[in-house]
Amino acid sequence: MISQGNTWIRGCLYVLLVTSCGLKAQSHCQGKGSTCSKQLTLLLVGKTGSGKSASGNTILGYSAFKERVSAEPATKRCQKRQVQDGNRNIAVIDSPGLLGTSKTQKEIKESLKECVRLSSPGFHALLLVINIKSGVTKEERNAIKWIQDNFGSEGLCYTIVLFTHADSLRGKSVDDFIAGSKPLKELIHQCSGRYHSFINDQSSSNRIQVSELLDKVEKMASSYFGGYYIDASFFIAQKDLEEENKKTKQEKEEQEEREQWRYEEERGGTRDRDL
């Protein structure tokens, strides 16, 4: 019963957060008029070497993230970069390799908290990046559970599978690649059939692949009220942290006032003795 109550409270809080943030964004746009930029925040997740950073650079149209050139991961911590593209303000968050990593679950959660913080008030799409050249790994076959464990069941509602290095298929289509993997077909099915593929270079001829991805993100986001994923438990933790920081700051100020008062009192006593 307690568990059901907590779930109900979490659900209500989630709805309130989405409603509040959605209305805030809507009123902001109405205030700006028809020229208001559309905000799109994308979170890239996947294995080290999947092409997350390269995909972020492809989306942004410039070398915003360091790309992997050795066995060492290029991204050590979550990073956020932005670009204005027409009437879209695009924010991309690149995460360290969190799928198939030696990191503990606690370390993964901490990294994801940082990613979610950077995406505040929420991300419009979670792009699960899979390198076609490397094939589908065990961790990627288990991606459904990984997403549910780390983002809850609602996380899949905002997930798009992004295949990198599509040009390496050599005559085969991405559909053929998907058809050859039952776990991959199931993953894409759980994501309501959403996937996209990239040829990872920044030539102008390939900008159309980015526009097509962003169109998919907008279409997906428009089907959910508020438009983006919000982790209610994260926001509760953030509020608690803000309250704790506020309390610590207040205690520090009070301590400084007491020390200043004691200092003034001691100085006054010294002057009286001198007189």
Image (tube, rainbow, N blue to C red):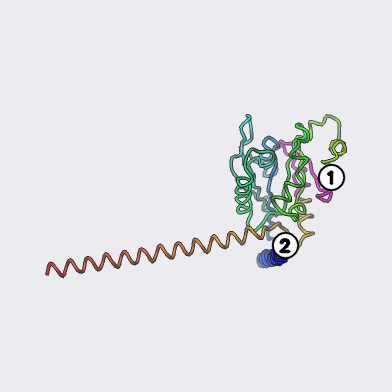
Front label number (2 vs 1)? 1
Q: Position of residue 79 (x, y in %)?
A: 60, 45
Earlier sequence position, callout 2 versus callout 1: 1
Q: Which quarter of the picture shows residue 56?
A: top right
On the rendered structure, is 110 left or right of 158? Answer: left
Residue extent of the magenta highlight: 187-215
**Along the line of sight, the residue nearer the viewer: 201 or 136:** 136
Residues at marks 2 and 1, CA–CA distance in whole angstroms: 27 Å
Q: Is residue 198 magenta?
A: yes
Taking the spot 11% from the left edge, 70% from the top edge, the residue there is 275
Q: Give amino acid for label 1.
A: Glu
Taking the spot 75% from the left edge, 47% from the top edge, the residue there is 145
Q: Is residue 105 magenta?
A: no
Which residue is identified by label 2?
Answer: 226
The residue sitting at the left extreme is 275
Q: Is residue 29 visible?
A: no
Q: Position of residue 99 (x, y in %)?
A: 69, 41
Q: Which quarter of the picture shows residue 181?
A: top right
Which residue is identified by label 1?
Answer: 186
Q: Position of residue 161 (x, y in %)?
A: 77, 44
| Label 2: few (<14), some (14–19) or many (≥20) C-alpha neighbours in 10 Å | many
Give the SS element for disc 2. loop
